[in-house]
Amino acid sequence: MVTKLKKSEYRAELARLQLELVKLQDWVRARGLRVVVLFEGRDAAGKGGVIKRIAEPLNPRVCRIAALGTPTEREKSQWYFQRYVAHLPAAGEIVLFDRSWYNRAGVERVMGFCTDAEYREFLESAPVFERLLIRSGIVLVKYWFSVSDEEQERRFQDRIADRTKRWKISPMDLEARRRWFDYSKAKDVMFAHTDVDDSPWWVVDADSKKRARLNCISHLLSRVPYEDVEPSTLELPPRGEADPGYERPPLESQRWIPEVY
């Protein structure tokens, strides 16, 4: 049985890893790298929590989160990968895909949102598309978050009971729960076609959220070789001299919020 991770240990290690993420960010900017990280997996597997902890200490102008909604009618008529291409990084950027083009192999397949022909075409095209990204110089890392049946049920029940978490669960999530084994089959077929040597799937054991976060961040740091780029020295200048002719308006003229706390 795995021992429970103490909060103090988790916080200390997360802080250390987040400092390393900042170093990675600085290296990506300095070298003009383009990094794409995909996060896929079961509903309530903790993908969002990991993405949040990765992005938290980083400059949002460097590290972006791409979480695409339902495609529009126009997007449905496009080449399938087209709307994802628009979110790929430029030089010096990191993009975290909170779900990705693999929607077609998961929810679209299981829920019948795509045809059999579209599904088969995706399974053949995805490895080719990813090879093109890698050949262009993009660093691509793919994560699959694995959560047990029992743990997913516990998290769903927690979301249902807690109003502040209710937004995290949708009718689609509930239907996906009912189709647990259909999703398992779809995931197995997806892996059989897209878990290839040049673009492998890395599986995260997500039954423990805290361990999953630390393990995933640690692994990501190992997949993008980086060096510590010493930041330039900053020195805060003294405040400028006040203009003797300037008179501030009285504080009472401003609308202050009530001090409830």
Image: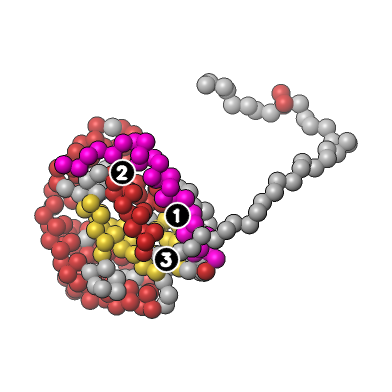
Let me know if residue 70 appears in the view.
Answer: no
Between tags 2 and 3, which lies in front? 3
- The residue lying furthest to the top in this view is 260
Q: Earlier in the sequence, mark 1 or mark 3?
A: 1
Q: Secondary structure at mark 1?
A: helix
Residue type at numbered disc 2: Lys
What residue is rendered at 42% in x and 56% in y?
Answer: 65
The dot on residue 210 is 2
- The residue lying furthest to the left in this view is 181
Residue type at numbered disc 1: Leu
Q: Position of residue 190 (x, y in %)?
A: 19, 66
Q: Position of residue 83 (x, y in %)?
A: 38, 67
Q: Position of residue 177 (x, y in %)?
A: 16, 48
Residue bearing mark 3: 225
Q: CA distance from mark 1 to mark 3?
A: 12 Å
Mark 1 Cα shell of 10 Å, populated few (<14), some (14-19), many (≥20): many
Q: CA distance from mark 1 to mark 2?
A: 17 Å
In the depicted view, which residue is nearer to us: 15 or 29? 15
- The residue lying furthest to the right in this view is 245
Residue 254 picture quarter: top right
Image quadrant where one finds the N terminus: top left
Residue type at numbered disc 3: Pro
Q: Earlier in the sequence, mark 1 or mark 2?
A: 1
- Magenta stretch bounds: 1-30
Q: Earlier in the sequence, mark 2 or mark 3?
A: 2
